[in-house]
Amino acid sequence: MIVGTAGHIDHGKTTLVRALTGVDCDRLKEEKARGITLDLGYAYAPLPGGGVLGFVDVPGHEKLVHNMLAGATGIDFVLLVIAADDGPMPQTREHLEIVELLGIRHGAVALTRIDRVSRERLAEAQAEVAELLAAMPGSALAAAPVFPVDATRGEGIAALRANLETCAAGLGERSRCGGFRLAIDRCFTLKGAGTVVTGTAFSGELRVGDSLLLSPPATPVRVRSLRVHDAPAASGGAGQRIALALAGVDRDAVARGMWLLAPSLHAPLRRFDAQLRVLSGQPPLRHWTQVHLHLGAEDVPARVALLDAGEIVPGGAGWAQISVEREIGALAGDRFILRDAGARHTIGGGRVLDIFPPTRRKRSPERLAMLAALADDDPGVALQLAAATQPAGVDLAAFALNCNLDPATLAELSARQQLKQVGDTAFSPARWQELEARLMAALAEEHERAPELAGVERDRLRRLTLPTLARAAFDELLAAPLAAGRIAQTHAWLHLPGHRVQLAAADRKLWQTLKPLLDAAPSNPPRVRDVARASAIAEETVRTLFQRIARHGEAWPVAHDHYFTADAVADLARRVAKLNERDGCARAATLRDEIGGGRKVAIHILEFFDRVGYTRRVRDTHVLRGSPGQFGS
């Protein structure tokens, strides 16, 4: 269990930790000289039944709240320290509000320096503490036990220590599901170990030798060795204080606020959507207010865009989008604190909901409903709503990254919702049925609009159904009605089974006359003008005939006035597929060698395949994304 101290400056936090652990957390010369804590301190004490109590001692000065916040994130239990002679002070209240905003649910109060006060004053101080806690109903500390202690003489320490041990036993170990994340709050160089970082692990687990990523810089590192709660260990995980010796990075490249992550969790961001609450003692929070954001061990300037109101009143809550000044790391569920632009007062705080917020319709009722679902502790609630409402399906990879879900947990959630999964995209059963209905309706409408056409090309039908639908999802959607005979395919054209287009007898006769000219050189047939010259037929007559033949599906306009027969295009598609299988792509030069024509016609053929969605261009290559079957062969 990680215990974090909280409270006003000079109320005895460091002295109390020393009494509980025997460790002096003030490690800096300035701290020892001035007798006040300036930065985070750490101490550890073994538990009787095994395990360790880890302490994070934080500074209490109002100008050092940013240091306090770097240590407070990730703790399990708060030990609020109040001096009996002073009673609750400004930083006592601010630290208590921060504890509440961070969602820390367990804690106790230590009433220190009881040796300096009379019995009457001690009773008054206890009443003041009770009044302070009662003023925050629902707080983790509203019913917290109060332990009067004299840390210098040890009075009351045993009872406080016993309470901490009981709470540690009750909490148990934190779940280690998801990828590893550690918020770095210290970095230094140690002789024989090199670069060392310390922090609290938010999730997952790691072992010596693991490869991680320093984020946001995206620097690959390897774990040379590690210590858990200041003891050598082979592994560590969520809920533990860990020190890691890293290979692959210099001390100067690491800063407080960075993260050590499983590489799959690297997703630096400049904005995120969140659930936000404003403290009752603060003025209303207005749209686009400038703030300081504290998340993990990071402190960064930011602005708050309110999504469901013009302002959030004191004590109120709402949805917001936080835009930060530089890239940071965050995932859904992370708690954060907002302080004013001058970093003098805590305004409020909240919880990250979505690290991939939309750029459009971010204030729509549908989006606000999604934020409410994301705020639920069960990620299945948001997954169910997204699968039911997002027309193009849920990107499961992005959803899993946002919530830090491991593959097994994601698979269990998908199975529970009975989602239709195509690759990394998932749809609710109702949404999938609706998409199929849209597909059939789009095909019928296109027949009505253009009855003279043989049908619709595959990629055009995808766009008519839903332009944002991934090709893999569309192919899966089309497969069922094709297999069932509810949709038919003639060459490259998709059509309803009852749809028929017949060429006029004169067009059929003329096509039979001219087609052999194209068949004579299938990979480089003559152009319209050359066909007209060879057949002594007017060029415009040839052109309009070929246009009608193309609409019927027996020819393709590969380039301007350059038509290939459907059989020739199907053969070229197979050749391009074989080149991709052999070389990983198709190039104009290799296709030219394959068909024995000029480079220019090879370029036209590949550009045609890009246009119809059979391939996609990657610099000077063409990578397969369709199948030869889409050309009817």
Image (spheres, grey):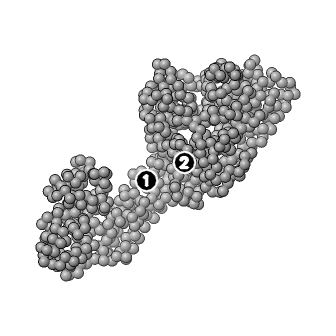
Helix, strand or loop at disc 2?
strand
Helix, strand or loop at disc 1?
strand
Residues 519 and 75: in front is 519
Residue at the (66%, 43%) spot, across then down: 340
Q: Which residue is mark 1?
A: 425
Tell me if I can see residue 35 in this picture: yes
Which amino acid lies under the numbered mark 2 shown in the image of this protein?
Arg
Q: Which residue is mark 2?
A: 271
Tell me if I can see residue 174 in this picture: no
- Most distant residue in the front direction: 342
In what quadrant of the picture does the N terminus appear?
Answer: top right
Which amino acid lies under the numbered mark 1 shown in the image of this protein?
Thr
| Neighbours of disc 1 within 10 Å: few (<14), some (14-19), many (20+) | many
Q: CA distance from mark 1 to mark 2?
A: 24 Å
User: In x, y percent, where is residue 299?
Assistant: 59, 38
Residue 501: mark: none
On screen, residue 221 versus residue 242, left or right, reads left
Residues 626 and 544: in front is 544
Residue at the (27%, 72%) spot, across then down: 551
Q: How many marks?
A: 2
Q: Quadrant of residue 571?
A: bottom left
Q: Is residue 396 above or below residue 259?
A: below
User: In x, y percent, where is residue 237?
Assistant: 52, 32
In what quadrant of the picture does the C terminus appear?
Answer: bottom left
On screen, residue 140 versus residue 213, left or right, reads right
User: In x, y percent, where is residue 16?
Assistant: 70, 24
Mark 1 or mark 2: name the one nearer the start of the chain: 2
User: In x, y percent, where is residue 165?
Assistant: 66, 27
